Image (cartoon, grey):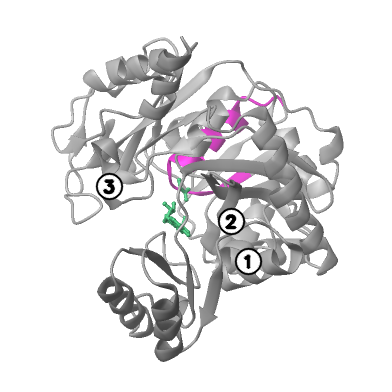
Amino acid sequence: MNILVIGSGGREHALCWAIAKSPECGTLYCAPGNGGIAEVAECVALSAHDFDAIVNFVREKDIGFVVIGPEDPLVKGLVDRLDAEGIASFGPTAKAALLEGSKGFTKDLCAEYGIPTAAYGRFSDADAAKAFIAAHGVPIVVKADGLAAGKGVIIAMTMQEAETAIDAIFGGRFGEAGAEVVVEEFLEGEEASFFALCDGTHVRPLVAAQDHKRVFDNDEGPNTGGMGAYSPAPVLTPDLTAQVMKEIIEPTVRAMRDKGTPYKGVLYAGLMITKSGPQLIEYNARFGDPETQVLMMRLASDVLPVLRACHDGTLDKAEIDWKDEVALTVVMAAAGYPGDYRKNTEIKGLKQAGALENVQIFHAGTKAEAGRIYATGGRVLNVTATGATTAQAQARAYEAIAKIDWREGFCRRDIGYRAIERETQGA
Ligand code: AMP
Ligand code: GLY
């Protein structure tokens, strides 16, 4: 069967890499793809927003299944359109993707179904939001309701910061995404990324991962899309995993079905593991980036039948097995990221680095030109390695990075430190 993957990041490279290994995969296409994806799939210059062009391409190339990576086309209804055309795909419909597309929608659903999450208020005017903040005090968290490319969350440590955030959001900083604001209680604890697959009725947990969101070592500096990740996440013990499924994931899937908008695809729960148990920070309607890179390294089963089972409603029968090893990925980003950075700088040494045993390099923002690779984005490479322990996987990933010659790039040097601390304590 011919497959089309939509997206251009490290997540999509990892998905393409895993799908290409499937005996069921015919020709694999990726739109628009990147310089690394081009090694495992045929990249096509299609925009994720041009639904007509996608449908035409699917017909022309006899594509049997479409896998959608990023949230934007999901929230805008690409799956609805493909459903209407009789084209099978992986991902939720627009109404189901509201779990990511509207933070207010998700908070209300949590309130209605008793799902543990931070106390909150929803506001469409600044005065009411400020009154709520004054009543609750700081620290407090201010969020634009809609999609804001991961930038719509402000953790306010002072009243001044909270009020400035309210004014900025209602002043249009995030466009339409900021027409409404959610203000919520600040949760303390350790974060983890939890993934579950859903077919509308059945739900199966995948493994958990942890991400490093801050740009600099020791989790300092501004938030980013993620500077590195590893799986498993030792903070999520088997007991906690069972609790997350029972108290958070399963009630959500039931709620979506009750509302007549069953959820299909991957449900990615951002969790805070607090003293009083796991709480939902937010949902994403897609795979995490860079978490998918470590998930795909650990997946022992063929990914394609699993993704298709989410569409077909047969997830209860799908085979989902994992390798008993740690995978860790380090993001190499362009100097300056998450602020301004230079583009089109050349990266060398990728072949030598990728040739190391247990190493895979996924490209997040590159292009290939005349046999050379150039950086085109903020997050550029995901240098990923496996090992028996987090410490081993980490050492191998940094060994690979040492072989990469890219002066304009940088990475964190401490990816996985929490898991390594736990390993050391447990030893
Ligand atoms: P989000 O885009 O909702 O994932 O938020 C981005 C980051 O902000 C999260 O990964 C957390 O680190 C932080 N965050 C969001 N909501 C809260 C909260 N209620 N309490 C503490 N930290 C939060
Ligand atoms: N790693 C964070 C995200 O995918 O949103």
Residue to which mark 1 is pinned: 106
Give the CA distance from mark 2 to mark 1.
8 Å
Mark 1 Cα-neighbour bin, 10 Å: few <14, some 14–19, many ≥20: many
- Mark 2 neighbour class, 10 Å CA radius: few under 14, some 14 to 19, many 20 or more: many
Among the two numbered marks 2 and 1 on one chain, the one whose residue lies closer to the N terminus: 1
Q: Is the residue 323 above or below the residue 418 in the image?
A: above
Above or below, 238 relative to 7 = above
Q: Distance of mark 2 from mark 3, alpha carbons?
A: 28 Å
Q: Which residue is mark 2?
A: 283
Residue lying at 51% horizontally and 45% vertically, measured from the top left: 288
Q: Give the class, few, some or many, for how many residues have Cα within 10 Å of label 3's Cα (few <14, many ≥20).
A: many
Asked if the residues shown at circle 2 and circle 3 are in contact, with their CB atoms under 8 angstroms apart, the answer is no
Which corner quadrant of the image does residue 83 belong to?
A: bottom right
Locate residue 121: give its quadrant: bottom right
Q: Amino acid at mark 3?
A: Thr
Q: Position of residue 421 (x, y in %)?
A: 39, 22
